[in-house]
Each structure stands twice: as C-alpha cells, then as structure tokens.
Amino acid sequence: MTDVREDVTVPPHRDSVVFLVDVDDTLLDNDRFREDVEAHLATGYGEPARDAYWAIQERRFAELGYRDYLGAVQEWWLAEGMDPGLLGVARYLLEYPYAERLYAGALDALAHLRSAGRTVVLTDGDAVFQSRKIERAGIRDAVDDAVLVYVHKEEELDDVERRYPSERYVLVDDKLRILTAAKRHWGERVTTVLPLQGQFANDPAIAAANPAADVTLEGIADLLDLDPGQLGRG
C-alpha cells in the first residue's frame, strides 16, 4: 500500500496577499552581529586569528553567495590542525543572543503585517545556522513557523509561490537586487518595500544600478505607520 502524505508546507488555498519578509538587515541588525563576531574573535583568539577566519569567511561568501559562518569555522578548524580551542567559536555563533539584535519594532511589524494576511519569512542562508538564528531571535514563533530558507532566494520565487500561492505579494527586503528580481518575476503582482537599514540598502552604487523600490522606509518599524492592507493592494 502506498503511503501518501500531504505536503503540510503548501497551504490548500490561494491567499489574496502574502507578505514576504527578509531577516538579515531587515528584521535583525546583521551588521552589528558581524561586529560582535569580529570583536569576540579578536579578544578571545587574537587579531591574526580573527583575520584568518574572516579571510575564509569572505572567500566562502564569494563562492556561495551567503555568509557561511559555521562552514568557515569548520574550514578554519581543519586548517589549524583541528585545534580544540576553536570549537568555542561555533558555540558562540549558535548561542549568540540574536533577539538582542532585532531592530526596534521588528516583531511588532511582523504582527502588524499578519493582521492583514499571511506573513512568511524569506531569507538566504544555510539550513542549520540561518534557521538557528531565526529561532533564537524569536522570529520563527512570530510567524508561526512560516519560514523559507534558500541559498539564493531570488532564484526560487516559483517555489515560494508553490508553497504560498497568492494573488499578490509584498516583499520587504534590504537588498534592491532582490526586490528588482521579484519585480521582474511577479511584475505588478508584487509591491516591493525597502527599509534603509544595513550596508546594502545604503550603498549608492547598488541604488544607482537598480530601480527604486515601490515603497522606501527609514526602518522596519515604519511599517507600523502603514496600512498593510493597502500595501497588499498595490
């Protein structure tokens, strides 16, 4: 007898609007997190060790397209002869208090969007570290486990729609290239929202190379001043 299981990640109906919200530098101050990691490495292991780890990190970022914090620890640890002292870096990353790096109003903004429609976290990263970050920050609970993690989310918008079919989407993201890709994919079915937080949102070269978002905010908390229902109508 064939065991047929329903894919519970796919809602059985089509929503009128789905809000898609990024994590790093949208809900969570990832630049501050990076500064904390660098300070921890310099203080606990010395500046040469910090530089060695970050050189691996930057190379892996160029190769993979996302910050592979744990993968960089693994490579660094092997390169240093599996030094047991370096294992504490992985513990630091996994146990970091991510909730303390949420932008002011981030979880309130999610609740505000949820009052008008299904709200889903849509983020780049790996299956272990990014998921851990989202959970420890309280973001997963704030969206009732509606979390999508992809290596390159702009390439997976068909899969996003398969899992969360909707007439319209609202995408909140600090990266204009992601917003541009979504607009190219969904056209007028998507409203793009850019919070001016983090290095990418405030890079003049990136701004010059991409069309402006439909809506630009100073920060994620400014969503609280907007009618999410109106955003969902375009």
Image (cartoon, rainbow, N blue to C red):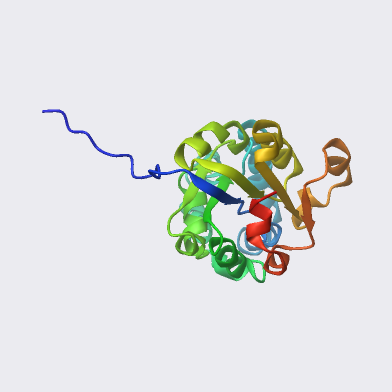
Q: Can you give x and y, in whole percent of width and height, for residue 106 in the image?
A: 62, 66
Could you say which is closer to the camera, residue 222 or residue 63? 222
Residues 1 and 152: in front is: 1
The residue drawn where x is 65% and y is 48% is: 171
Q: Does residue 179 appear in the picture of this structure?
A: yes
- Residue 37 appears in the rendering: no
- The relative height of residue 53 versus residue 95 in the rendered view (above or below) is above
- Please indicate whether residue 8 sits to the left or right of residue 137 in the image: left
**Among all residues in the image, which is located at the extreme left?**
1
Q: Is residue 66 left or right of residue 149?
A: right
Q: How many marks?
A: 0
Q: Quadrant of the N terminus?
A: top left
Nearer-the-camera pick, 159 or 73? 159
Residue at the image point whose x is 61% and y is 63% from the top: 44
Image spot of residue 184 (x, y percent): 70, 32
Measuring 57% from the left and 63% from the top, which residue is drawn there? 110
Residue 108 placement: quadrant: bottom right
**Residue 24 screen position, x and y as percent:** 64, 53
Instruction: Farthest residue to the top: give it.
Output: 1
Residue at the spot x=57%, y=46% of the render?
Answer: 123
Q: Taking 52 as reference, is 17 left or right?
A: left
Q: Position of residue 153 (x, y in %)?
A: 59, 38
